[in-house]
Amino acid sequence: MQFVVHYGLHFLFPLAIAIVFFRKEWKRAYLIFLATMLVDLDHFFADPIFQPNRCSIQFHPLHTYWAMAFYFVLVFLKTPYRWIGIGLLLHMLTDTIDCVWTYSQCASCLHDSPAESLVRFIHGFIF
Ligand SMILES: [Zn+2]
């Protein structure tokens, strides 16, 4: 279920944003949103590369708060930088939701996550 929602958010949510907000150029916008998933290439710097229940946020270099601040700045630039920024922020949002979901099922799984306090805060806010 979490897997389905995660990839639904990665693929369908950006599609909805592209269609609703960039109707005339939605295909280009969506393509760029999809391309921003390359941000996950930073996982290759991690050891192990894949670890179940690991929260990407603040763990991988392109998933840090500093990186997100930069993505936020991109949103105020011209197209296509704006689309890149939006795509990256949507990606971070999806990954954050995933972390909160993981936390809600296994709080101890995030005990060594650098984003634990953020995730605990959001979790407490929702539940
Ligand atoms: Zn990611």
Image: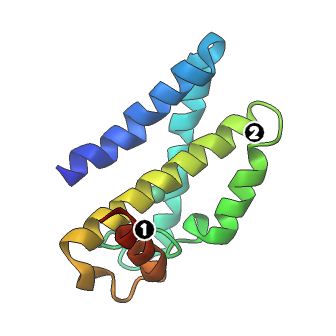
Quadrant containing the C terminus in the rendered view: bottom left
Residue farthest right in this picture = 77
Q: Position of residue 37 (x, y in %)?
A: 50, 46
Q: Is residue 45 above or below residue 40?
A: below
- Comparing 62 with 14, the one in front is 14
Q: Which residue is mark 1?
A: 122
Amino acid at circle 1: Ile
- Please tell me in which quadrant of the rendered image residue 36 appears: top right
Q: Residue at x 34, y 73 (%)?
A: 54
Image quadrant in which you'd find residue 8: top left
Image location of residue 123, percent across then percent down: 36, 69
Q: Is residue 16 above or below residue 89?
A: above
Q: Amino acid at mark 2?
A: Tyr
Q: Which mark is residue 81?
A: 2
- Number of marks present in the image shown: 2
At mark 1, the secondary structure is helix
Q: Residues within 10 Å of mark 2 (few under 14, many from 20)?
A: some
Q: Earlier in the sequence, mark 1 or mark 2?
A: 2
Point 67% across, 35% down: residue: 83
Image height of 32 relative to 86, above or below: above
Q: Which numbered mark, 1 or 2, is in the foreground of this view? A: 1
**Does residue 76 appear left or right of residue 99 in this picture?**
right
Left or right, 59 with reference to 9: right
Extreme residue in the top direction: 24
Q: Is residue 106 left or right of residue 54?
A: left
Res 25 seen here:
yes
Q: Position of residue 6 (x, y in %)?
A: 32, 49
Residue shown at the point (51%, 56%) measured from the top left: 92
